[in-house]
Image (spheres, helix red, strand yellow):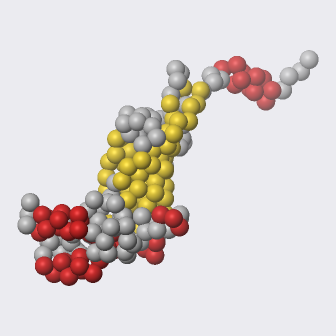
Amino acid sequence: MHVSLLARVSVATALLAVPVLAGVPIPDTVLYGWVFIDRQSQGTGNDVSVVARVDVDRPPLGNFPSDEDSQGQIVGRYRLGEKQSAGDRYVLNISLESLADSSTQGDRAAVVGQTVKIYVQRGTAPEQHVSDYLISAAGRIEQLDLGDHTLGDWDYDSRITLNDYASFASCMQGPGNSTTSQCLATFDFDRDEDVDLEDHVQWQSAFAGK
C-alpha cells in the first residue's frame, strides 16, 4: 500500500510530540490606584493604559523576538475608564496560575513568586516602566499608585506649601462625603475615599516635613 510523504511526516510528528501540561488557574491578584504622569494624576480622558508583564524563560518564536518577548509577556491590561465604577482609577486584574509537575507557564498568566513589571502607556507612545510588584499570594487586592507624585502637593511642584493648603480646604468635605477625583488623588492620605480631618493631620505632618 502506498503511503504519501505527507502522511508519513504527520505520523512521525505525532509520535514525537510531547504533551505540554498547562497550569491550573487560581484567583487573580488585583491592583488598583491612581496613575500619575509628570506628577499629574491621569483620568478617563487621558487615553492611558496600565500593562502588567512578567519575564518567562521561553524561546522566542521565529528568528526574531517579538516586542512582547523582549519586554515580557502580558498578564494584565487596563485602560482608564474601561470600568465606569472605577472612575479615574485603574483596576488591573493579573491572571495567575499554579504549575503542577511537568506543566509550563501559560502565555497570559503569572505564578506566585514572580515579580510583575508595571508599565504605563499614554496613547500610542512607548510603554514606560513605573513599578514592580511581587506576587506573594493568590487572590490579593492591593492599592498601588503609579508614577511620581507627592501626596498633598496640589500644584505638582514637588513641594508641600501653603499654596497647596487653599486647595486642601476646598477639597475637605468631611468623612464619607464625596469629592473630586483630583482631590482624592492628592489629599486622601489614608485612602478611605474622602478628604477629612484625619487627612488634614497627615497633610500638616507632610507640610512640616515629618
Q: From this viewpoint, is residue 71 visible? A: no
Q: In this view, does 128 lie above or below 117?
A: below
Question: In what quadrant of the picture does the C terminus appear?
Answer: bottom left
Q: Residue furthest front?
A: 175
Residue at x-position 45% and y-position 49%: 30
8 and 74: which is toward the camera: 74
Q: In this view, does 101 lie to the left or right of 148?
A: right
Q: Is residue 201 above or below residue 55?
A: below
**Whole-percent x, y for residue 62 in the image:** 54, 42
13 and 42: which is toward the camera: 42
Which picture quadrant has residue 114?
Answer: top left
**Whole-percent x, y for residue 6 in the image:** 79, 30
Residue at x-position 51% and y-position 39%: 27
Question: In what quadrant of the picture does the N terminus appear?
Answer: top right
Residue at x-position 23% and y-position 68%: 197
Residue at x-position 31% and y-position 71%: 174
Q: From this viewpoint, is residue 187 visible? A: yes
Q: In this view, does 173 lie to the left or right of 110?
A: left
